[in-house]
Amino acid sequence: MKIVFDASADSYAVVAFPVAKDELASLNLPLDAGQVVRDGARAARFEAGAGEVFDVFVSQGGKTLRVALVGTGAGARADMERAGGQLVAKYQRSGVESLAVDMTHGALATNREAAAQFLFGADLRSWSHDQYRTKLPAKSKVTLGEIAVIGGPKGLQAGWTDHAAVVAGVALTRELVTEPANIIYPESFVERCKPLEALGVEITVLGQDEMEKLGMGALLGVSQGSVRPPRMIAMRWNGTGDAQSKPVVLVGKGVTFDTGGISIKPAAGMEDMKWDMGGAGAVAGTMKALAGRKAKAHVIGICGLVENMPDGNAQRPGDVVTSMSGQTIEVINTDAEGRLVLCDALHWAQEQYDPEYIVDLATLTGAIIISLGDQHGGLFSNDDGLADRLTAAGKAAGDPLWRFPLSKAYDKLIDSPIADIKNVGPRGGGSITAAQFLQRFIKPGIKWAHLDIAGMVWADKPGPVWDKGATGYGVRLLNQWIADNFEG
């Protein structure tokens, strides 16, 4: 979405007026037909709730003008984002190519952050992915490409740069998650990340030979049934000015397609498994956001990238593999593959970068969807302070988390009779035992959190700032957490 500042209302055929609940009674619009708009809104029971939109055609200066009132509710951050998002949703495919937002009155006229959040929501909601739809009806095509700001608080345009960078990061994540598995696979995922080098991100890529030499038997066991070779990508952004500063490390599960392997999934719904790399997608998008806004932090994003296929060379249930850490794993179920990818990625991250903090993100278990649905990501952590800060960042940013327990009592559920550990436990507590598995690969003294985001990366219906499909979950959360805790 193109955002234009210092616009003139005379140049646009559609003008939107953000209205808070407490402004509705005294609403004074700079229009010849202001009373008509107010009466129409009242008749339509417009109450200025967050994201509520009322529109009407009026005569203004001898021309027909389309006027929209968009409610900003109580004015909270989430209200502003929802308002901007729903304004775009209203006009995105309507034939309207551009619209103006009048910020000369009310809270948006003086509150720079509120105005920026409104535009942030609008820009997030504008993302779409129609490139493979060659026969899309004209009425279904995206037409809205520009939002112009009339008035607005001082410094809004200058402050918009950081928000725009986060939008770009979310867009990259949505793109990676949305693309089909014949387009995004380990090698092409890496190529989609290469443009980050132009933003100052240093990229390191490990191929199969390098991973074999490092002893990544867990990750390589997942990929051995696919003709697509695995990759490990590390993206470093250091905006601290200190080459020796200790990095924060983010690790993402990147199973670019998951058939389940020999423990094959049911056919119904398997196409959704193109988004089993949602954790890796979130890490890549976060790195783009941080680099785009020149974050004053040292962050490394690592993605373990594989495809899980049921080839004649695929690993079998009952196989024992040796992870990079030296721990042996009995593979009870080849569809519990994400933790096998992550355990080697986590160990390599610790060996290579010696972080104080490490956070992994993964579409790891169906059990977390049973527990939380699509309302929260699951949070597991060995450090209460880290868990609290991540929860706070998620709440502020609109990517909510809910904490689950970790306990030695669960460890016995994943003890193997023939190896150090098995990759699944019983049906009960499936998300917890998956997290317990990962915790065995975290070194003492490292503050670690695991985010199980299986219910969050893909939406079956539109949300406040996303359409059906990829949500971009995780980018706003991680960006907020880093901004709040690692930038001075």
Image (cartoon, rainbow, N blue to C red):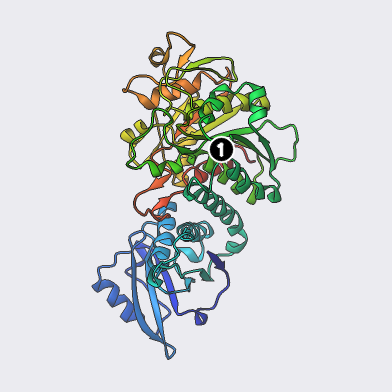
**Which quadrant of the figure has residue 92?**
bottom left
Image-based side of 368 in relation to 249, left or right: left
Residue type pointed to by label 1: Arg
Q: Identify the residue shown where x is 69% and y is 50%.
A: 199
Residue 254 image offset from top left, x and y in percent: 52, 37
Residue 428 in sight from this viewpoint: yes
Say which quadrant the C terminus sits in: top right
117 shown above or below 377: below
Residue 405 in sight from this viewpoint: no
Q: Which residue is mark 1?
A: 228
Residue 137 image offset from top left, x and y in percent: 39, 70
Q: Identify the residue shown where x is 46% and y is 28%.
A: 337
Image-based side of 192 in relation to 433, left or right: right
Q: The residue tagged with tag 1: helix, strand or loop?
A: loop
Single out the residue that lies furthest toward the front: 312
Residue 341 image offset from top left, x and y in percent: 53, 28
455 shown above or below 67: above
Image-based side of 262 in relation to 185, left or right: left
Single out the residue that lies furthest toward the top: 417
Q: Identify the residue shown where x is 41% and y is 17%.
A: 407
Neighbour tally class for label 1: few under 14, some 14-19, many 20 plus, Cα within 10 Å = some
Q: Identify the residue shown where x is 57% and y is 29%.
A: 358
Q: 245 or 42: which is nearer to us?
A: 245
258 shown above or below 139: above
